[in-house]
Image (spheres, rainbow, N blue to C red):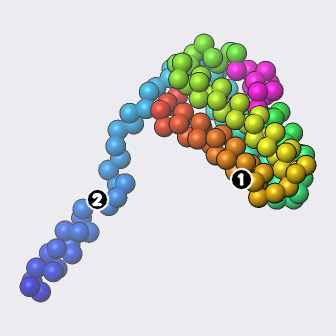
Amino acid sequence: MPRLIFPLFVLCLLLPGPGAARAADDRELVKLPAMMQEHMLSNMRDHLRALDEIFLALAEDRASDAAKVAERRLGMSSLDSHGADHLAPFMPGTMKAFGTAMHRAASRFARAIETADIEPSPKTQRAIYAAFQEITANCTGCHQAYRIR
């Protein structure tokens, strides 16, 4: 038995660990001109910065500021500033649907924050979390289905 332990130990060291062998990226490639690729990536990075700003504002009891950032940077009001109309023709229908759903969810998130600021309660807090999850669920869904590089 002891003779088997060492070879098995060595074999275990040589075997690839979890995640070592990456699966092929089977997400749909959305081909965009280089300038549009950078534009889209810039928009998504701004979305992440906006989420950081929203959480900081909420942590500092500045709900009104959080709602403004959510609407202006992520919500339906943000579409013009992000140049969404220029990107849309390059996107598959489902990708557009994810984007639209995310922007609508962000507008609902802003309303949920405003409601919670007016009527603070566990119920309104849960509504904020649920609305936030709807935003990130659309981001996650899109990123799981599509890639641009």
Going 64% across and 18% down the picture, which residue do you hit?
87
Residue at mark 1 to residue at mark 2: CA–CA distance = 42 Å
Viewer-proximal residue among 62 and 119? 119
Examine the rendered structure and indicate whether residue 24 appears above or below residue 82.
Answer: below
Query: The magenta stretch spans which residues?
Result: 75-84
Q: Does the magenta stretch include residue 49?
A: no
Going 74% across and 48% down the picture, which residue do you hit?
128
Viewer-proximal residue among 67 and 130? 130
Q: Which mark is residue 19?
A: none
Q: Residue at label 1?
A: 126
Main SS of the magenta segment? helix
Q: Considering only order in the chain, which callout, 2 or 1, is on the residue closer to the N terminus?
A: 2
Going 68% across and 15% down the picture, which residue do you hit?
86
User: In this view of the protein, can residue 66 be seen by the observer?
Assistant: no
Q: Does the magenta stretch include residue 77?
A: yes
Going 26% across and 69% down the picture, which residue do you hit?
13
Examine the rendered structure and indicate whether residue 122 appears above or below residue 105.
Answer: below
- SS state under label 1: helix
Q: Which amino acid does label 1 sit on?
A: Arg
Examine the rendered structure and indicate whether residue 91 appears above or below residue 101.
Answer: above
Q: Where is residue 12 in the image (x, y as percent from the top left)?
A: 23, 69
Q: Residue at label 2?
A: 16
- SS state under label 2: loop
**Crowd band around label 1 with a 10 angstrom C-alpha radius: few (<14), some (14–19), many (20+):** few
